[in-house]
Image: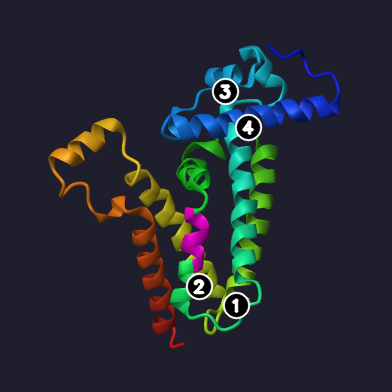
Amino acid sequence: MHSRARSPEAKLRRSEDLLDAARALATTRGGIRHVTLSAVTEAAGLHPSAVRRYFASKEELLLELAERGWDEWRDRLTGHLAGARDLTPAESAAAVATALTAQPLFCDLLTHVPLSLEGDVDIERARRFKTHSFAAYDSIVDALTASSRTLTTTQAQELTAAALGLTAHLWQVSHPTPTLAELYAQNPRWGHVALDFEPRLTRLLEAVAVGLTVRDGH
């Protein structure tokens, strides 16, 4: 077991150890829903009671991962769009889908953030998450608008909202529990095309982006 963190640097390292352990467990155990604090502390080499020195709860720990996920999505997408100035709505949508697909943990967390994480922390931690995520959201909308041939700011906002909602649903459907996987093997019709996450997300976002411009006459 690690000794108790005595300095700010050591405390930061312990926090990072816990976050790294949560990431690894989510990957190996089939998603965020299977991550427990006891497993995280064990993987990080800490006593179960020690986690409270760094995160008030599992929800706070996972919300930190979601906050960082927003930063990574922003950086991936804005980096991909840098220098582009004449993208079609479908190309903008495909870029959004590609950047999200590259972040499986963030895709998983997008279901849990509104369901439990941001509502089960104290108000100041929730405020920090909202401030941070909305700043990343604004940067994403700006990048989509600047790189597009036709998307307005409102349309870029609506495309981003659609991306968040579709990802939160489709990611869970495309990563079924063992019970559901067996059920889908027995009845393939139930294991519908949404199981193919990236192509389905891309197609639906392209339809949203094109539909927005058609509806608004652009």
Residue kind at label 1, given as amino acid type: Ser
Disc 4 marks a residue whose amino acid type is Leu
- According to the picture, the residue beneath numbered tag 2 turns out to be 92
Q: Kindly report the distance in space between the C-alpha atoms of the residues bearing marks 4 and 1.
A: 34 Å
Residue name at image x 72 percent, y 14 percent: 2
Mark closer to the chain start, 4 or 2? 4
Residue 161 visible in image: no
Q: What's the residue type where badge 3 is placed?
A: Val
Q: Earlier in the sequence, mark 1 or mark 3?
A: 3
> What element does badge 3 sit on?
helix
Which amino acid type corresponds to the residue marked 2 in the rendered image? Answer: Ser
Secondary structure, mark 2, is helix
Q: Is 186 situated left or right of 70 in this image?
A: left
Magenta stretch: includes residue 98: yes
Q: Mark 1 points at which residue?
A: 147
Q: How far apart are marks 1 and 3 (CA)?
A: 41 Å
Q: Give the range drawn in magenta.
A: 95-101
- Residue 80, x across and y down, in percent: 60, 67
What whole-number distance in Å separates the C-alpha atoms at marks 4 and 3? Answer: 8 Å
Tags 2 and 3 touching, CB below 8 Å: no
Q: Residues within 10 Å of mark 2 (few under 14, many from 20)?
A: many
Q: Name the residue under label 4.
A: 19
